[in-house]
Image (cartoon, rainbow, N blue to C red):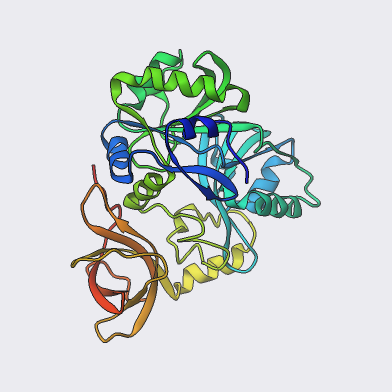
Amino acid sequence: MKTTALNHIHKALGAKMVPYAGFEMPVQYEGVNIEHQNVREHLGVFDVSHMGEFIVSGPNAVALLQKISSNDVSTLTDGKAQYAYMPNDKGGVVDDLIIYRFTAEKYLLVVNASNIEKDWAWIEKQNKGIDAELRNVSDDYSLLAIQGPKAVEAMQQLTDVNLSEIKFYHFVVGTFAGIDNVIISATGYTGSGGFEIYFKNDNAESIWNKVFEAGKDFNIKPIGLAARDTLRLEMGFCLYGNDIDETTSPIEAGLSWITKFTKDFVNAENLKKEKEEGPKRRLIAFELTERGIPRKDYLITDENDNEIGIVTSGTMSPSTGKAIGLGYVNTPLHKQGSKIFIKIRKKNIPATIVKLPFYKK
């Protein structure tokens, strides 16, 4: 099992360590609810160094990215990032990712940890005949997500970069915690603001310590992957392996907003046809109206106990106190306000389809 450069620090802090995407990762420190609320109200730091990083460069970089990405890379400018997915040729999703533009000929792709090898092989395959320059730097870089409403104020002590001026999905390369060439990105998967910072592994312990020193007056805490999951679910953000995968249609998953048919890309023709005709099922958000907790793969039924779908993500929301979930249901049973049922231990628990996000500031 792989480890991040901060593995020994997590163990010293008493984190519960679990296998995740081939890495030994901290799932929680004090407890999911405490960590979750600390990010919503104060400041939390996630070690997400298990994520993958690929550099795509050279005069043919854009040609490759336009082919593999659902989104339109040509709309990016230097210092801007873009959420996208890579469609496969069978109607599903290879992975979702963030694309960062440094220059017209240099881009960083950040992919999910569980998909690093698969994604790399897919991109290399699509690059045949295009010949963009590719580098897999996943093993060289660490990544911290510094999230929460106090992130700007606390972290400003560590850099001359004006953090308050970095817009959402923009980034700056600058000096941070005394280290040069740190990528400071106003991105994250929590819905509570903050930054994701990328740096070489050699600097991981130094930066971690300085981040916690700078955050000590802001109630900073280390946060595990369990709270990362509850935070992203409250926002309705898709998790690869749960809500999207090689078999799920991005149109069904509600990812049309990052599917740009103004250019050609892998499987574009079929996805466009699906969007025009309407998908057979749709990803919906729901809240239980009686006691119970929905979990992945629980069945969704109608009032007559007919199976109409399946849960892909579910939890008890720490912020709202409600049992929430995402799942696919047959079209046209996806309308907001509709009553559905989640089969929990052979009981049908009523739920209502709601609008995302579950958590509203």
Q: Would you say 324 lies left or right of 129 here?
A: left
Name the residue nearer the viewer: 120 or 81. Answer: 120
* Residue 13 on image: x %, y %: 43, 31
Q: Mark yes or no: residue 338 visible.
A: no
Quadrant including the C terminus = top left
Query: Furthest residue to the left?
Result: 290
Image height of 53 relative to 288, above or below:
above
* Residue 44 on image: x %, y %: 36, 33
Q: Mark yes or no: residue 135 visible.
A: yes
Question: In terms of image quadrants, where is residue 349?
Answer: bottom left
**Residue drawn at the location 63% of the way across and 57% of the way down:** 265
Question: In terms of image quadrants, where is residue 163?
Answer: top left
Image height of 355 relative to 111, above or below:
below
* Residue 203 on image: x %, y %: 58, 22
Q: Would you say 15 lies left or right of 62 here?
A: left
Question: In terms of image quadrants, where is residue 267?
Answer: bottom right
* Residue 110 on image: x %, y %: 58, 41
**Residue drawn at the location 74% of the way across and 36% of the way down:** 59
